Image (cartoon, rainbow, N blue to C red):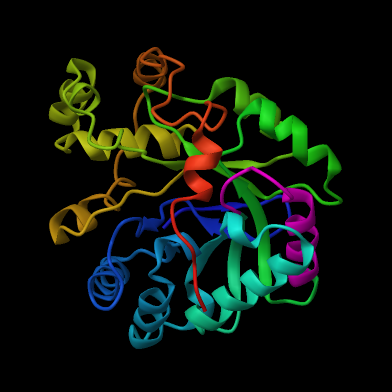
């Protein structure tokens, strides 16, 4: 598994296994065990996914040394602000029950982000969290919050795939060696992307499926990807992308697919209120 070095010196596997919308109390446990067996060493969860417990149990039951597995989780909106964030961090640590968290993110960029960030910085200094980062920050939102931080985020996790390549954002992140993590790296099942003639022709050339072409393009372009599946064959296939390489001409052709449009706009009217009212995370 290829790895990247974050701007704080820690290493992160470039392919992670996402568990968004996989239920707790069994399904996430089974999926994570399958992923670890397939060779994944990076699992991405969140307090708001309500499955941190299953992730932690699967990691412990896998037989793989804890230090060989990279675990990401995320702080939810209800726990922003300095004092409340300390409670949220402690809750994630308790539910995962893995001793420490490799990467912890500000999940949604609204409200007292700076207070929450301070608590995350302190948790990092205490060794409870190895790396800290943000998620869903557009260029505008990044410039609103990050200049107030004492330390730069290690990553920004956003929607990213060949149809929305986040070029403007990447230019901002590159200045501080901040890595971009892609959620929806397969376009969230977008048939126009998976069935695009360029993608299907490359799949035929390299004897791969369309999803593997997308993930190879993204990792080869310097991105971290977080594909999600509960299908054992797709779980296995999504990590089998390091035995071929696209040519520079093919990379340029893939880059030309960028529309600059995302399906989720963190700046859109009503998004913050919708997310704040979505649910409550309980102890």
Q: Please determine whether, in this image, residue 199 is positioned above or below residue 58.
A: above
Q: In the image, what residue occupies the spot 61% across and 27% down?
A: 169
Residue 222 visible: no
Decide which of 110, 171 is in the foreground and name it: 110
In the drawing, does residue 61 fall left or right of residue 102? Answer: left
In the drawing, does residue 261 fall left or right of residue 19? Answer: right
Q: In the image, what residue occupies the spot 43% across and 72% down?
A: 52
Q: Position of residue 182 (x, y in %)?
A: 45, 41
Q: In the image, what residue occupies the spot 36% across and 19% down?
A: 254
Stretch of the chain drawn in magenta:
106-124
Q: Quadrant of residue 207?
A: top left
- Classified by dominant secondary structure, the portion drawn in magenta counts as helix
Q: In the image, what residue occupies the spot 31% across and 70% down?
A: 32
Q: Position of residue 110 (x, y in %)?
A: 65, 43
Q: Quadrant of residue 118?
A: bottom right
Q: Position of residue 45 (x, y in %)?
A: 44, 62
Q: Please determine whether, in this image, residue 153 is positioned above or below residue 221.
A: below
Q: How many numbered dots are placed on residues in this image?
A: 0
Residue 282 visible: yes
Residue 244 on the magenta segment: no
Q: Position of residue 257 (x, y in %)?
A: 36, 15
């Amino acid at each position: 598994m290829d790895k990247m070095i974050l701007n704080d010196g820690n290493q992160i596997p470039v392919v992670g296994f996402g568990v968004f919308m996989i239920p707790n109390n069994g399904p996430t446990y089974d999926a994570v065990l399958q992923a670890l067996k397939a060779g994944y060493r990076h699992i991405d969860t969140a307090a708001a996914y309500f499955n941190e417990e299953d992730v932690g149990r699967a990691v412990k039951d896998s037989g793989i040394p804890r230090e060989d597995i990279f675990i990401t989780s995320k702080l939810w909106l209800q726990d922003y602000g300095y004092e409340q964030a300390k409670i949220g961090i402690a809750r994630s640590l308790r539910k995962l029950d893995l001793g420490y968290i490799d990467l912890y993110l500000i999940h949604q960029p609204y409200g007292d982000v700076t207070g929450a960030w301070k608590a995350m910085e302190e948790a990092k200094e205490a060794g409870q969290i190895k790396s800290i980062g943000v998620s869903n920050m557009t260029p505008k939102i990044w410039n609103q919050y990050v200049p107030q931080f004492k330390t730069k985020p290690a990553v920004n996790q956003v929607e990213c795939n060949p149809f929305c390549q986040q070029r403007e954002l990447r230019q901002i992140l590159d200045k501080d060696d901040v890595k971009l993590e892609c959620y929806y790296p397969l376009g969230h099942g977008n048939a126009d992307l998976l069935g695009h003639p360029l993608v299907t022709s490359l799949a035929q050339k390299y004897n791969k499926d369309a999803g593997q072409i997308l993930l190879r393009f993204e990792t080869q372009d310097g991105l971290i990807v977080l594909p999600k599946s509960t299908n054992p064959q797709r779980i296995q296939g999504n990590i089998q992308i390091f035995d071929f390489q696209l040519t520079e001409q093919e990379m340029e052709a893939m880059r030309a697919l960028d529309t600059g449009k995302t399906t989720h706009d963190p700046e859109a009217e009503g998004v913050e209120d919708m997310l704040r009212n979505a649910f409550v995370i309980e102890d």
